[in-house]
Amino acid sequence: MIPEDFIVFIVDDDPRMREALSELLESLGWRSVALGSAGEYLSYPRPDLPACLILDVELPDINGLDFQKQISHGAHPPIVFLTGHGDISSSVRAIKDGAVDFLTKPFTERDLVEAIQSAVERDRAARHERAEIETLRERLASLTPREREVLPLVVSGLLNKQAAAELGISEVTLQNHRSKIMQKMEAASLADLVRIAEKLQIPITHSRRAGGI
Amino acid sequence: MIRLPREVGIVVHQEHPMASSGFLPEREVDESMPGQGWSADPTGKFVYISPRTLNYIGQPAEKLGRLEGTHDCGWRQVVHPDDYDRVEARWLRSLRAGTPYESEHRIRRFDGTYRWFRDAGMPTRDDQGRVVGWRGTMIDIEAEKQAETASRHGEVELLQLVNTIPIHLWRLSSDGEPIFFSKRMVDFLGTDVARASKPGMSRLEALIRTAVHPDDAAEFRGVLNRCLLTGEGFAMRHRLRRADGVYRWMSSRAAPMRHRDGEIAQWHGLCMDIEDEIRTQEARREAQDRLARATQAASLRELCASIAHEINQPLAAIVATCHACRRWLSADPPNLDRAKSTLERVIRDANSASEDVSRIRALFSRIDDTRSPADIAEVIVGVCRLMADEFAMKNIELETDLDQSLPQVLIERVQVEQVLVNLIRNAIDALDTIVDRPRLIRLHAVLDDDGNIRVEVRDVGPGLTAPERIFEPFFTTKENGIGMGLAICRSITESHNGRLWAVSNEPRGTILAFTLPIRARDAA
């Protein structure tokens, strides 16, 4: 099951639907917040938890599918759509744009539970990814300017000698910078450092051969 | 050698033995007769030529004699060059065989103009049967010829007319046998009237079987036979088979030509190709029907969608709440309080769904807000105009008896029109199989004793076996019907506080009648 705490946001303009969904989620032992419109959802302070957004397609202030597009750039939880009449084209559109599921009312408990679980799982993974990158960014920020010059050369695969020549410093000095970088970035090996650099999208500026000539 | 006393214009061949063999002098006979006489000897030499002839041609008789030793008759110069060879050949043949001679040819007058003459001669024989001479007469037939030419000209023109006007013409004998097809008709059918026959049946029947579309044949036969019997004009639209096997819609008409005593001599008929017209009309009507269906379907679909949404919303809430309730009950220990409160919500939501339904009903009962006063006679006339094509297509005779002084009535015009169209279409369909009598539909609009306007649609079709059942939804006797027409009509009339019912027409057929109260009763 779900090891951590999480929260389900319900956005539906029908109060009966909101109540029913809250009740059902509560009976499952899950936390939920029910809101009547897209605007209410946006202004609601979201806790720092894995989450899922259950979104009615026919919202009073905006079409659910358009709202999905609008929030796709921010760090919003994965969406499970609810609709009164499922038509294939809008469900395809929703799924293509990243929705977890598209449920037609009335839906079964099982479909809803499965959709929420997979949405929360997906959000947990995304949050994990976001957190990791945040940590790596902090480590990157702790490097000195010189170390930040050395890092791309090292992860490009240049030999110490080549990298030192590139920067016009001695091989020993470069060696020192390199071990400091490994330490600060908490990289276990060069391979680990390359993976970290990739996540931080540090460009590979040199190929090993280029410096040799 | 000929001596010609010019003053009397007589040619006498005195040396010829004929004179002494009892051949009578012609002069007295000739001048007392109409026409212009002549006589000749057995060799064809003129013995006598009427002075009237000589005056006419303005030439001396000696110039007309047959030249010695030749076949030239001498009158070559006065006979029209186009006619001469023919006349000469005929004359020489008669001379040789001793058979009567007759010819019509043009002869030049003294002033150079030609006139037509009929010239006839007979041999005169002696006791032994030998030809002793010839006597003949010429009669001026110019006037006759001109009249003949004029009439032939007229005939040619008429034939040209018959063959070039873009319709097919035909003629039937008084008992209905085809006796003439115009050239266009022959070209269309690919058969001549003479070849239209088939063994074992009349020519008309053969024609109906081979040329009239099988779906139209029974009606065609029925209508035409009725016309042949009664002498009424024939008019019908039907499909006719072209030589290449393609059927085309025709508008056929025929009228009897009568003798003086009134008896029918022949039938003259025409077929006009109206295929293109029919196609256009059909296309237009199909487009209209499609549009009407689409409009209805679209508004119906929207209506259904919104009703479905209204009902679905509380149902979805109820289902979700029930799932929650089950969860509370199956928890360990069961949470009865929560289960109870969720059940309360189920009850509440179910009631609210039921209220939604009532709300929708109420929405529809407010429909008479759009009713407006209308003149029912005018509405009926409008509908008939809309359906004129259908009447024509199905050979429907329409009679209307509409009380023009009827008061106005508050109706949803489109709905009442829909009722009328439905009832009239029903009547048209009922008449579909009728071929032995006019396909008559009568429309009545009257004020009844209860102060209602009563509209009746009467047909003379086969009648109904179950008058009440026809109003049941999905009841239909038609292959293509879904059986909703009359059920809808009844609900429309009832929403107008009227009634719709069916009774049998006398002596046959059906009456569908509906009422519309003049004063709308207060909504209950």
Image (cartoon, rainbow, N blue to C red):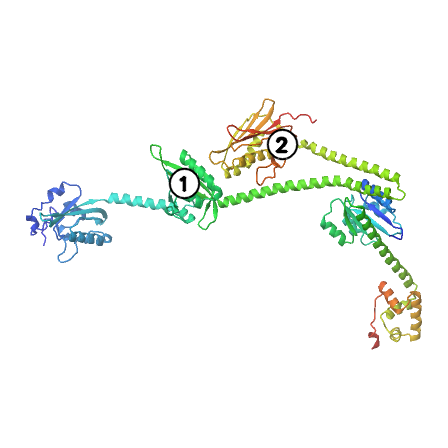
**Of circles 2 and 1, which is in front?**
2
Work out whether residue A14 can be spotted.
no
According to the image, label 1 marks what residue? Answer: B269
Q: Position of residue A90 (x, y in %)?
A: 73, 50
Work out whether residue B276 can be spotted.
yes
Mark 1, secondary structure of its residue = strand
The disc at residue B378 is none
Mark 2, secondary structure of its residue = helix
Label 2 to label 1, Cα distance in Å? Answer: 46 Å
The disc at residue B490 is 2
Three-letter code for the amino acid on which mark 2 is drawn:
Arg
Nearer the observer, A161 or B190: B190
Q: Quadrant of the C terminus of chain A?
A: bottom right
Q: Residue furthest left?
A: B20
Above or below for B76 versus A193: above
Q: Chain of mark 1?
A: B
